[in-house]
């Protein structure tokens, strides 16, 4: 971290002393007074922060939240929305996939954040609830109507606190106020600094109509068309789960202890009266060489370490496919072969176009350090200017038509409100801006991937190291639907940019994209050389109906065949939503908190 960040920290301490009093944030378990915890939550990410907040609302309930990464406060590139792509790797898990044959044998990054707030502390901040049909499919797959679109509405309201955008512009016609809550905990807002790409996007939508038609609000249950994106940003600053649900007023609760720099390894059984194993102890280390510490819960242990770490911790604990566990020298305790299997993740490519050199884009902010420093100063003083926004502006969500679906061979979507593809626009060359030039990036994403047998497991090398990175096989673009769909998505992007609105803005595709458009084979090669899984990973500890013969948790998110153990994070969603996964994780966490409170009468 450079001088700017240190100054920023100082600035925070001087101007808002209360926001840096880390009342109940502990760096070592030995700093915490001995406490009998009702609940121990492993993982202070997007979901764990919510559960910790909600359970500690009752002051008679003692809660310990255990997070592997460090505190989130006062870190400039995390707080500044536009800096999402330049967050240093010290806040990342640095996970990569094993070589992927369908991606030219590349091992690709599989980002997830290593810091309080989890991936909500490093993501693109897009707030997207997903289509109605996806939630109704979760209800069908689990036999629990509580997961249907209509039933989750109260949990959306508990999470969302709609706020004006940073520049306080008139937002009429940019979203539907009737479907938003102003009473939740996490701030949701619209873009706070406009660039020319915005009005051009709207013009193109008008000129082309059809699948590109304007949709007032993509969070209505039907996201199809072009919409303004919505973000978890508050007054020009990232509003992560940590910044919102673990804000200073919540951290001050005497019954909530937040332990950082504590990496979870396993959950352990404690003796119980019943014959069902009870996993009420959490094992963790402050140092990878040990020692290992334990924290016990009298009511429940909740694993919220995210779709990548959760299956790893379950497998380390002996919960998983018994024959696999035996083969790698772990004593199997609970046979749940679904752990780490059936992962569901989007496939994405980032495509770039060269734009008019007189156009305003974000590129220059990353090409000219003097300018960037000035903008950081402006941001610190006023929370205004181009740094207040996520790089992603408008989104198009679209369904393939019937004739395209026939070519692709199937329709994996959940129903008519569910898009197959998204086009996400970014006014610059992201993630890595080259030293010169002005660009427009459009990411094309397959939202209904059909690649299966994707898995997250652990290395079979002996002796076992519980802290070794997980073995991730994303199997991205291994099916006909996914690769042909990606071709179609890129051609749809070309069609979008053929609207007259772009005539004076777009100069043309970058050279590798231009070459790819020459033939199907060239396009496939381009996709396989730059495409990969994105951060939207779910399904690795999937919920299924109570009587299903597969799956890891019941619809109430309690782990099957054991006592005392619940999973609350993206792992429980059986299939990835056709949208960004952050809001669904908040919804899962709010509903889970409510189920837990109900069960224990708290
Ligand atoms: C990821 O890599 C960075 C840079 O080497 C390092 O500082 C960080 O600790 C790594 N993350 C983890 C979880 O080990
Ligand atoms: C990927 O690796 C496999 C095994 O080493 C090899 O057979 C295959 O040809 C490679 N594919 C590409 C595209 O390089
Ligand atoms: C915002 O814009 C709408 C439509 O253009 C207009 O009706 C409304 O009066 C404006 N609101 C304010 C506060 O200016
Ligand atoms: C469990 O693992 C074994 C060995 O790794 C494998 O053969 C078997 O198919 C797995 N079972 C299930 C249900 O996935
Ligand atoms: C993966 O999900 C399918 C249903 O989509 C199920 O039949 C299968 O058993 C699951 N696999 C594992 C290993 O749990
Ligand atoms: C960089 O930005 C500063 C501040 O806006 C400006 O004065 C300078 O001319 C810029 N440098 C270049 C090479 O554009
Ligand atoms: C936003 O931040 C600025 C700069 O710190 C401050 O002056 C302003 O009051 C804040 N606005 C809101 C709505 O919190
Ligand atoms: C379906 O979509 C494809 C690709 O966008 C297009 O070429 C075709 O005309 C469409 N078919 C119909 C019947 O609309
Ligand atoms: C398993 O771990 C060993 C030793 O650290 C490493 O060489 C190997 O590449 C790992 N295998 C996988 C599949 O990650
Ligand atoms: C670039 O934009 C200017 C207006 O800002 C326009 O006059 C010019 O024709 C554009 N150049 C191209 C190549 O479209």
Image (spheres, rainbow, N blue to C red):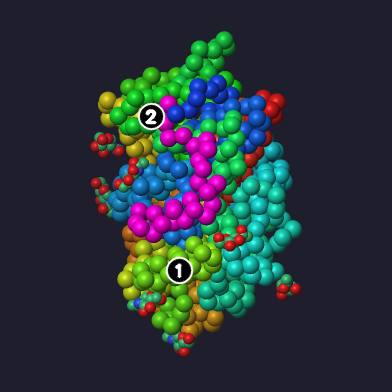
Above or below residue 315? Residue 162 is: below
Q: Main secondary structure of the magenta part?
A: helix
| Residue at mark 1: C-beta within 8 A of ligand 6 | no
Specify the segment rendered in magenta.
Answer: 1-30
Give left or right: position of 252 versus 95.
right
Q: Residue at x 42, y 78 (%)?
A: 355
Cβ–Cβ below 8 Å for labels 2 and 1? no
Q: Which of the pair 515/84 is nearer the observer?
A: 84
Q: Is residue 24 magenta?
A: yes
**Mark seen at residue 285:** 2
Q: Residue at x 57, y 12 (%)?
A: 274
| Residue at mark 2: C-beta within 8 A of ligand 1 | no
> Which residue matches tag 1?
375
Give the secondary structure at mark 2. strand
Which quarter of the rendered image does ligand 9 occupy? top left
Above or below residue 124? Residue 548 is: above
**Residue 192 screen position, x and y as percent:** 57, 66
**Residue 154 screen position, x and y as percent:** 71, 44
Q: Which of the pair 235/399 is nearer the observer?
A: 235
Give the secondary structure at mark 1. helix
Q: Is residue 531 magenta?
A: no
Above or below residue 65? Residue 537 is: below
Asked whether residue 403 is in view, the answer is no
């Amino acid at each position: 971290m450079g001088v700017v960040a240190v100054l920023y920290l100082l600035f925070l301490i001087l101007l808002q002393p209360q926001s840096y009093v880390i009342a109940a944030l502990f760096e070592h378990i030995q700093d915490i007074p001995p406490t009998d915890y009702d609940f121990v939550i492993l993982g202070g990410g997007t979901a764990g922060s919510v559960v910790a907040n909600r359970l500690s609302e009752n002051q008679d309930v003692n809660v310990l939240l255990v997070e592997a990464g460090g505190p989130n406060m006062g870190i400039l590139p995390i707080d500044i929305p536009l800096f999402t792509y330049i967050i240093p790797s010290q806040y990342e898990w640095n996970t990569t996939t094993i070589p992927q044959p369908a991606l030219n044998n590349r091992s690709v990054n599989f980002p997830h954040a290593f810091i309080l707030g989890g991936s909500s502390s490093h993501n693109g901040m897009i707030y997207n609830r997903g289509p109605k049909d996806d939630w109704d499919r979760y209800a069908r797959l689990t036999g629990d109507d509580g997961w249907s679109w209509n039933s989750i509405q109260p949990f959306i309201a508990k999470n969302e606190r709609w706020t004006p955008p940073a520049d306080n512009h008139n937002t009429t016609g940019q979203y539907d106020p009737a479907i938003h809550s102003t009473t939740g905990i996490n701030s949701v807002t619209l873009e706070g600094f406009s660039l020319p790409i915005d009005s051009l996007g709207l013009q193109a939508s008008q000129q082309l109509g059809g699948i590109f038609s304007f949709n007032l609000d993509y969070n209505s249950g039907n996201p199809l068309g072009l919409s303004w994106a919505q973000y978890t940003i508050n007054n020009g600053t990232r509003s992560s789960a940590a910044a919102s649900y673990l804000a200073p007023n919540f951290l001050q609760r005497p019954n909530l202890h937040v332990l950082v720099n504590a990496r979870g390894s396993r959950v352990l059984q404690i003796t119980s009266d019943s014959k069902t194993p009870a996993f009420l102890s959490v094992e963790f280390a402050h140092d990878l060489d040990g020692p290992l510490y334990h924290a016990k819960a009298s009511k429940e242990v909740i694993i919220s370490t995210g779709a990548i770490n959760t299956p790893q911790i379950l497998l380390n604990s002996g919960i998983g496919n018994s024959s696999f566990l035996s083969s790698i020298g772990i004593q199997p305790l609970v046979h749940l072969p679904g752990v780490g299997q059936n992962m569901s993740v989007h496939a994405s490519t980032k495509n770039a176009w060269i734009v008019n050199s007189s156009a305003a884009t974000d590129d220059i902010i990353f090409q000219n350090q003097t300018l960037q420093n000035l903008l950081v100063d402006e941001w610190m003083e006023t929370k205004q200017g181009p740094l207040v926004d996520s790089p992603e502006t408008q989104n198009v969500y679209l369904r393939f038509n019937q004739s395209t679906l026939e070519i692709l061979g199937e329709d994996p979507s959940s129903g008519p409100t569910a898009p197959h593809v998204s086009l996400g626009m970014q006014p610059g060359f992201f993630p890595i801006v080259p030293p010169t030039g002005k660009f427009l990036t459009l990411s094309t994403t397959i939202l209904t991937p059909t690649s299966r047998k994707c898995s997250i497991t652990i290395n079979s090398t002996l002796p076992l190291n519980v802290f070794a990175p997980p073995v991730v096989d994303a199997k991205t673009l291994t099916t006909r639907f996914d690769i042909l769909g990606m071709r179609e998505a890129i051609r749809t992007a070309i069609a979008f940019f053929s609207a007259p609105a772009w005539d004076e803005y777009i100069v043309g595709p970058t050279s590798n994209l231009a070459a790819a458009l020459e033939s199907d084979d060239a396009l496939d090669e381009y996709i396989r050389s730059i495409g990969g899984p994105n951060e939207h990973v779910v399904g690795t500890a999937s919920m299924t109906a109570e009587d299903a013969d597969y799956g890891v948790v019941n619809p109430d998110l309690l782990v099957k065949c054991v006592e005392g153990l619940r999973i609350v994070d993206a792992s429980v969603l059986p299939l990835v939503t056709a949208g960004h996964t952050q809001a669904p994780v908040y919804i899962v966490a709010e509903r889970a908190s409510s189920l837990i409170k109900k069960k224990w009468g708290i």
